[in-house]
Amino acid sequence: MMKIAVGLSGGVDSAVAAYLLKRSGHDIIGMFMQNWHNTEGTLHGNCSWEDDLDIAKMVARKLDIPFEYIDLSEEYSRRVVDYMFAEYERGRTPNPDILCNREIKFDVFIREANRLGADRIATGHYCRIASFESISGKTFRLIAGADPNKDQSYFLCQLSQEQLSKAVFPVGHLLKPDVRRIAAEQNLPNADRKDSQGICFVGKVDLPVFLQQKLAVRKGDTVEIMPGFYEKCRENIPADDYAELSKPFKYSPNDGKKIGTHDGAHFFTTGQRRGISIGGHAEPLFVVGTDIETNTLYVGEGRDHPGLFRRALFISRGEIHWIRNDLALSEGETLVCDVRIRYRQPLQKATLAMQPEGLYIIFDKPQRSITPGQFAAWYFEDELMGSGVINA
């Protein structure tokens, strides 16, 4: 049996994870991470971190396990939030939850758990770990959670072999209703508590207000791009010209018509609908592109606007991460697999093509809202093989 530090978040998943590990005979420590104090931009009516802390303490008392509170806000601000602001300022859309897992939950938190004598850490993530022995030692596999509606492997797509070797996911084999049932049977204080939403440790936010803490409002033009603009954009591109297929559409103000203004192109992301605030159209407007240098926002009418779709994306060589190096592609190799470019998106068939400059992903079907700064993760069957930051 091992000594395991469980990250108690106040949610039901981590509470059941702690219960299952204790029932199995492990020596358990409950640990609560406080990573954010600033409430500017957060939406009222959502659970605050104080509520989370109180409930985490109640869970620890109910399970009769030691409880530790740790404040990691300085490192969270430096390693996650500062990165988030910098990416938005560049016109890219980061995923802070993935960064939080890589930089905080499975790095700094592991360090703090080790300080308390823990051999492993556990969380309530819906995913699984498997391993096998090879000539080079034990190799760990990151497997999707058994519940297809709750699988959270995508959020862990940047973890390393070292991090996986220290992790335990006790609820990864369960369905969410089973977790709720176990919590109710054990009279855990959060058995009926709603799942948290929003940015990891920050909560649900009004994103423009949140970003205005560091990013200035800059008035700019909103330009509508008509569907006819795209008729000749991608004609006659060879199927193996990955670089051309992956290029995002480039616009100039002359390509469309000015229909309004906005408060800063860096507050918007591809595919976004909320916040455009321009009426007079039969269908909603969506962001089809931004130009940070000219501070221009480009929009198109309708969910099926052609500017929202692309067949391929590119990940630069320095942004490619393989969870298992033994599966990494060599230059010139290709691999047919499944790819996800956002959480909860159904897996999409695609071909990975490794080139000298980086990795191209060519989808069987055009994908909506391929967004620079987000993560693409690739799977073979139910194993997450690797991921990377979308460059274009």
Image (cartoon, helix red, strand yellow):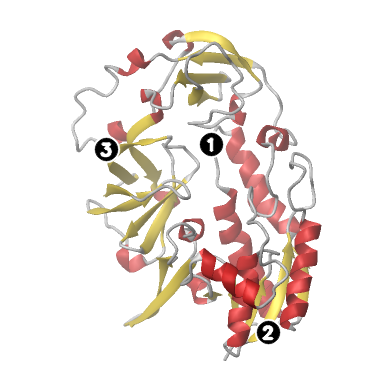
The local secondary structure at tag 1 comes to loop
In percent of the image, x 66 and y 67: which residue is there?
191
Would residue 139 appear left or right of 373 to someone viewing this image? left
What residue did someone put label 2 on?
117
Quarter of the figure with the C terminus: top left
Label 2: how many residues lie within 10 Å, few (<14), some (14-19) or many (20+)? few
Classify 205 as above or below 327: above
Residue 119 appears in the picture as rendered: no
Lower sequence index among marks 2 and 1: 1
On screen, 178 above or below 336? Answer: below
Residue 173 visible at all: yes
Q: Is 385 positioned to the left or the right of 162 in the image?
A: left
Residue where numbered disc 1 is placed: 92
The residue at which mark 3 appears reads as 242
Q: Quadrant of residue 240?
A: top left
Q: Residue at x 33, y 13 (%)?
A: 228
**Picture coordinates of residue 353 (x, y %)?**
26, 48
